[in-house]
Amino acid sequence: MNFIKKANIPQILFVILVLSSCGKDKNTNATTADTVEDTLPKMKPMLQEKKLPANYVTAIKNRVDYFYNRNWPNNTMNGSFLVARNGEIIYEKYEGYANKNEKTEIDKDTPLHIASVSKVLTATAVLKLVNAGKIDLDQKVNTILKTFPYPDVTVRMLLNHRSGMRNYAYFTDRDKSIWDRHNQLTNQDILNIMATKDIGLEYKTDTRFTYCNTNYAMLALIIEKITGLKYKDAMSQMIFKPLGMTHSYVFDIDKDRKTAVPSYKGNNVEIGIDYLDAVYGDKNVYSTPRDLLKFDRARNAPGFLKPALLKEVYEGYSNERKGEKNYGLGIRMINWYSGQHFYFHNGWWHGNTSSYITLQKENVTIIALSNKFTRKTYAVRKLAPIFGDYPFVFKEIE
């Protein structure tokens, strides 16, 4: 009462106004964060698919088991392997050590580094942003990343590897005036180097296809710029959480270097972390076959993208030379003259090798991951003839 008597009415109103404003600021910040998350385009799981007949599953399982034992005799695979149709797992195997020193074994929940299969996930996030109208496929990259030094490069050209940029691993590996390999390289460092160190193009933009990891390192920065989130958080909010990919994450070198599954040379020697291991977008996603199955089915679900955009994803953009191999928007393909199409992506980083295959006509998903270097991971494409008219050699009788 003494305060009310001594203070005049305007002063009391001012105090009330200030207190009220503070409360509104807190509410506004919370609302803004919620709004950002709410406006993110997110993947949606595939709805329930047709169940496979039991006799079919048994027959296919036997054929895949034959392949597995021929490809990895005596349980020599060090990794994860899964074959599914209509989202239903027909066959899966988990063999070998996640960490040889600790004798921890790989199982269905062990996230392995999926190497360049990460590009399919990065491309998916970018395509969802395009689909939502937040960016345009033919938008110039320098309208998003203001210091990006190559004026003719578009988002589409990053996705289909027609930018003409040089691989960051090659222009940072020897010249200390460009980059000191004692320091960890980041995506932002790559952009800064290209913007300030006169890193010329390898060839003129959009004149030919050349597979280049720099493209996808820049796409990760675009995701961050457009969403206002770190790449790992954007991938979590847009892809991992909506699809229930509970064993998938983007490697954070500061937080995960001691807990992530290591990789090994073919002779079992562990391959350590190097100066390129903080770069993401082109690699650095860890996942499991079961999680990638959820991802694949969501990519094949109705409504994943608008029909016109989806068609562009599976167009071939590498047409300088006549041939059957090609690259779309974040996906490799083989377009046989018979009219059959085969969509996939392989990966290799340190000792990690990976293969992701999606047989769209047959609703089949094939995943193979290994953390001990082997090219046998890529042989899983030979399973395609079990499901459709694919001209790979699958010998069941020697």
Image (spheres, rainbow, N blue to C red):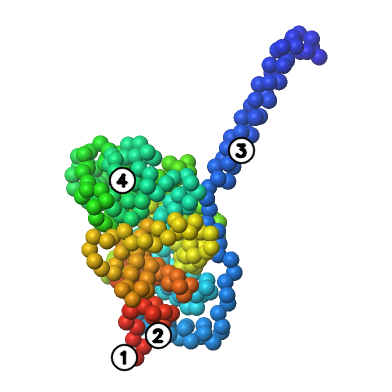
Mark 2 surroundings: few (<14), some (14-19) or many (≥20) residues within 10 A? few
Mark 3 surroundings: few (<14), some (14-19) or many (≥20) residues within 10 A? few
Residue 241 falls in image quadrant: bottom right
Q: Which residue is mark 2?
A: 66
Disc 4 and disc 2: Cα gap in Å? Answer: 47 Å
First-in-chain label (4 vs 1): 4
Q: Nearer the viewer, mark 4 or mark 1?
A: 4
Q: Is residue 311 left or right of residue 266?
A: right
Disc 1 and disc 3: Cα gap in Å? Answer: 65 Å
At x 45%, y 42%, the residue is 226
Q: Give the residue type at disc 4.
A: Val
**Spot occupied by residue 301 in the image (x, y as percentages of width and height):** 52, 64
* Nearer to me, 126 or 214: 126
User: Quick check: marks 4 and 3 in contact, CB under 8 Å?
Assistant: no
**Spot occupied by residue 73 in the image (x, y as percentages of width and height):** 35, 82
First-in-chain label (2 vs 1): 2
Q: Nearer the viewer, mark 4 or mark 2?
A: 4
Disc 2 and disc 1: Cα gap in Å? Answer: 12 Å
Q: Give the residue type at disc 2.
A: Tyr
Q: Which residue is mark 3?
A: 31
Q: Secondary structure at mark 3?
A: helix
Q: Which residue is mark 1?
A: 398
Q: Nearer the viewer, mark 3 or mark 2?
A: 3
First-in-chain label (3 vs 2): 3
